[in-house]
Image (tube, rainbow, N blue to C red):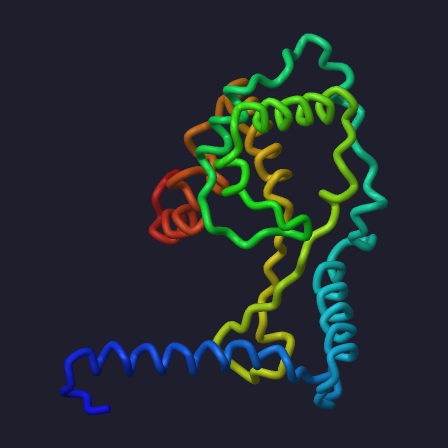
Amino acid sequence: MAMGDKGGDKKLYRLIKQERGRLDLDQVKCIKEEEGKVLVDEISIKQRWRRYFHKLLNEEGGGDIVLNDLAHSEGLRDFGYCRCFRIEEVIRAISRMGRGRATGPDEISVDFWKSADKAGIEWLTRLFNVIFKTAKMPDEWRWSTMVPLYKNKGDIQNCNNYRGIKLLSHTMKIWERVVEMRVRRGMSVLENQFGFMPGRSTTEAIHLITAGRKI
């Protein structure tokens, strides 16, 4: 295949992309232990990732992060005056979420709920109201899938050169979005609040402090 041929550049780019994709798939197949021993069998590799992320997530603080041991808040029971979630709120929350995202352990995507008919959204709204009234979420929502992604620098077989991405239930994310919309309507945020605010990242605050400006 000559570079000058019609469509040659596109074909070459496609071949490089395919080769890069195969390389990416192999990145997690050989991982080193802390002492440097290379692991090749699947069971040992999974155990190594489990130990690595457990240590990473629990290296700060006094107790281990175990979701099943977290007590749910009883506070929602006291809010008897709060009205039930309406189907319009659920539809609005779903519309604000993007398509094509990787799914969590339940493999139910936002695309499914975006394509659901009125009966499906009504069922989801009833589920959210049951969770709201009982202050108990489904146990399945406590599970997530941890995916290691290479940072494209350093030893490719070293766990420290990967960042973990947790894939959560999309249905739970919709529930969180509905609750967040309620909370934001009932609160006011000061202008000097940074972090988790649209257009006001903590990086911006750092730059302002560095420049000696008053926030």
Query: Does 39 sit above or below residue 135?
Result: below
Q: Estimate the x, y position of residue 172 in percent, counting from the top left.
A: 64, 38
204 up-or-down from 126: above or below? below
Residue 68 in the figure: left or right of residue 212: right
Relative to 51, say whether 144 is above or below: above
The quadrant in which the C terminus is found is top left
Residue 186 pos. (x, y %): 54, 18
Q: Residue drawn 80% across and 33% down?
A: 72
Please count the marks in the image. Answer: 0
Q: Residue at x 83, y 37 (%)?
A: 71
Residue 43, position in %: x, y? 78, 77
Point 66% across, 61% down: residue? 146
The N terminus sits in image quarter: bottom left
The residue nearer to you, when weighing 28 against 214, is 28
In this orientation, which residue lies closer to the viewer: 193 or 33?
A: 33
In the image, taking residue 192 as reference, residue 170 lies left or right, namely right
Q: Is residue 125 left or right of residue 76?
A: left
Q: Residue at x 15, y 80 (%)?
A: 6
What is the x, y in percent for residue 61?
A: 76, 54
Q: Residue furthest right?
A: 69
- Considering depth in this image, is 207 or 159 the residue closer to the camera? 159
Asked where in the image residue 87 lies, by quadrant, the reply is top right
In the image, taking residue 195 as reference, residue 119 lies left or right, namely right
Q: Residue furthest top?
A: 81
